[in-house]
Image (cartoon, grey):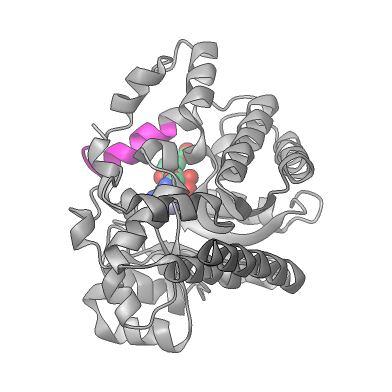
Amino acid sequence: MTEHLVDPRAPRDLKAFVAGLPKAELHVHHVGSASPRIVSELAARHPDSKVPADPAALVDYFSFTDFAHFIEVYLSVVDLIRTPEDVRLLTYEVARDLARQQVRYAELTITPFSSTRRGIDERAFMDAIEDARKAAEADFGTVLRWCFDIPGEAGLEAAEETTRLATDDRLRPEGLVSFGLGGPEVGVERPQFKPYFDRAIAAGLHSVPHAGETTGPETVWDALTHLRAERIGHGTSSAQDPKLLAHLAEHRIPLEVCPTSNIATRAVRTLDEHPIKEFAEAGVIVTINSDDPPMFGTDLDNEYAVAARLLDLDERGLADLAKNAVEASFLDPAGKARITQEIDTYTAGWLDR
Ligand SMILES: Nc1ncnc2c1ncn2[C@@H]1O[C@H](CCC(=O)c2cccc(C(=O)O)c2)[C@@H](O)[C@H]1O
Ligand SMILES: [Zn+2]
């Protein structure tokens, strides 16, 4: 069950503050954000799927014994996304859910390889996400950008295909800003992906691989040295290496921290054991993210509440976390200034009320 994942202990008034706080989210997956309503609607369309169409049954289905089990469940949801219309519906509804949490800007991680290899036409896929991105900005005011990630376990074929889709000017979508690496890390050495990250960076994309989620600090070092990571997805095991913490702090390389994800995938045993406090005490830039919120029984607001408890934050501390994410984002300077100003105005208004 996932009740242990929702943190009831954050003070109530801070939850109200968080609910209205303008936010940015940098580490949240496209398919992983499909709401129970969307997943059950798609599962009902495809009765051959093992994904339950009943939202209540979905809660148990989204309980994982380990990381490998999480990936298996994740891919069963990927299998539900079969048409460009499924892609467009999913993307637009994810934007609606983000807007409900006052997310003004989000970099959504998409794995195009997983969809094109399942038969969705690549041009139709790009058109679907771009249509949804423009509609979401017009309807909700939420600015979306894309990160295309390589599913590392699928190997160099997936790396080549993802790089082609991300760098071919006839295909790459206008909203694409970054290039990542997801999936299991065990046995998926980061250095082999250097040629693909080099091509993506040469095409103007920012490098943001997952690293140190289920493997040690050496994977984070590899992501920094071989993949030229500008941010690190999770980086949880960095806390095991004081030199790495010092390097991340000195070079201002942010960690995309996803507290509840780490518990749900068993990467970390309990929230109280999460290394987020070590990151903050070492001066590492921390951003708060939800990763795959419906799958982990959480949402971004809850992740901020968890961070408030683990870092003992007040409203100003929470506002600083939100500003960290804006600053670490790949949004243009004017957009960053606009959202940062919104955060400051909101926080001042809250404290003066
Ligand atoms: N916390 C996370 N940590 C890591 N990744 C995460 C996390 N959350 C979500 N993901 C996503 O999980 C997928 C994994 C897909 C994958 O491993 C795979 C393996 C073999 C074949 C295929 C295929 O498509 O044929 C896919 C990726 O898309 C990634 O973006
Ligand atoms: Zn992730």
Is there any visible trace of residue 183 in the rendered image? no
x, y percentage for residue 184?
35, 51
Taking the spot 34% from the left edge, 49% from the top edge, the residue there is 261
x, y percentage for residue 121?
70, 33
- In the image, 30 versus 112, the foreground residue is 30
State the predominant SS element of the stretch in magenta: helix
Task: Report the image quarter containing ligand 1.
Answer: top left
Taking the spot 71% from the left edge, 42% from the top edge, the residue there is 140
- In the image, 61 versus 206, the foreground residue is 61
Q: Quadrant of residue 277?
A: bottom left
Quarter containing the N terminus: top left
Horizontal side of residue 118 vs 332, given as left or right = left
x, y percentage for residue 281?
30, 80
Asked whether residue 69 is drawn in magenta, I would say: yes
Horizontal side of residue 240 vs 37, given as left or right = left
Above or below, comparing residue 14 to residue 329 in the picture: above
Taking the spot 45% from the left edge, 56% from the top edge, the residue there is 289
Taking the spot 43% from the left edge, 34% from the top edge, the residue there is 75
The magenta span reads 65-75
